[in-house]
Image (spheres, helix red, strand yellow):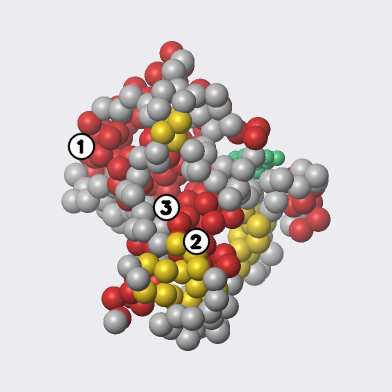
Amino acid sequence: MTYTLYLGDFTYSSWSLRGWLLFEKFAIPRREVRIDFNADQSVAAQLAALCPPARTVPTVVTDDGAILSESLSIAEELAARHPEAHLWPTIPLARATARTLTAEMHSGFSALRNDCPMNLATAYRDSQPSEAVLADLDRLETIWTHARETCRPDGPWLCGAYSIADAFYAPVAARLAGYNLPMGETARAYVAAHLADPAFRRWRAMGLARREYLSRYAKDHPTTDWPGPAPLAAHAVDGTEAENDACPYSGLPVTHALEMDGRRFGFCNAFCRDKTVADPAAWPAFMALLDKR
Ligand SMILES: N[C@@H](CCC(=O)N[C@@H](CS)C(=O)NCC(=O)O)C(=O)O
């Protein structure tokens, strides 16, 4: 089974992040195609030329010809086609809980979504949330606490191992963190788990590497540092001199390099290098190279 996954911006497209996490967290192979949020043509017009009748990202095209253009349908279809990957929890009580949380996210939290658009490149110190946003936050604390009390997970996720529900709430967590919104004990721990999650960090690092900026999502609030784990220090350097001959991601010859801890590492293009500079520890293949010495 092969899939084509159409995605929007890394920095701003919260639904794209959900769709991508469904593949990335469960190691489902796909070909990714980027829809340009900065183009003159609308997202809908770009998709109309590629996979009608889709109008939004994420959209997945399956090799038997299905066009899945709603995140919930992508999640359900991947869960059905890859039962061994356990996208839903296996315990019925946990699965049922994950399903209701996912459905509520898909149809709810409109105040939070409208007032606090996801922006993974910027964090705000004070965003003065409205009463409606505060009500959404209360609801999140209630249902996240209920899920954890019901499912009793060993780790940080809502219903046991990372599931579709967590992929759906990842951009919500990014909003709570990025807009410095008031959080109860459950939300604080859950949001921190998302910010530290290597897959989430890889997605964010790709947006930083592309230096994505869309003024329509900018807010006037005072800004602060990103509240997630501080990245290891690395910087881009000129030339191709490096400890490794082949890019850790593609195996292709080195054309771009970074320096870290006085050592130089090479990559097959500027994007591979820059996404690593943005957050080296998020990339297992790079960290394996670092550990080699
Ligand atoms: N209900 C859809 C929502 C998808 C959605 O609204 N995606 C946004 C990007 S985050 C989009 O494609 N917007 C089109 C546009 O900006 O023109 C889903 O579950 O996937």
Question: Dot 3 corresponds to which residue?
Answer: 200
Q: Is residue 121 visible?
A: yes
Label 1 sits on a secondary structure element that is helix
Relative to residue 184, is residue 265 depicted above or below? Answer: below
Label 1 Cα crowd, 10 Å radius (few <14 / some 14-19 / many 20+): few
Label 2 sits on a secondary structure element that is helix
Q: Nearer the viewer, residue 170 or 277?
A: 277
Ligand 1: quadrant of the figure:
top right
Q: Residue at x 52, y 52 (%)?
A: 208
Please say if the residues under marks 2 and 1 sit with CB atoms less than 8 Å apart: no
Question: Dot 2 corresponds to which residue?
Answer: 275
Q: Earlier in the sequence, mark 3 or mark 1?
A: 1
Q: Residue at x 42, y 52 (%)?
A: 200
- How far apart are the alpha carbons under marks 3 and 2? 13 Å
From the viewer's perspective, tell me whether residue 19 is left or right of residue 291. right
Q: Position of residue 277 (x, y in %)?
A: 45, 61
Please say if the residues under marks 3 and 2 sit with CB atoms less than 8 Å apart: no
- How far apart are the alpha carbons under marks 3 and 1? 25 Å
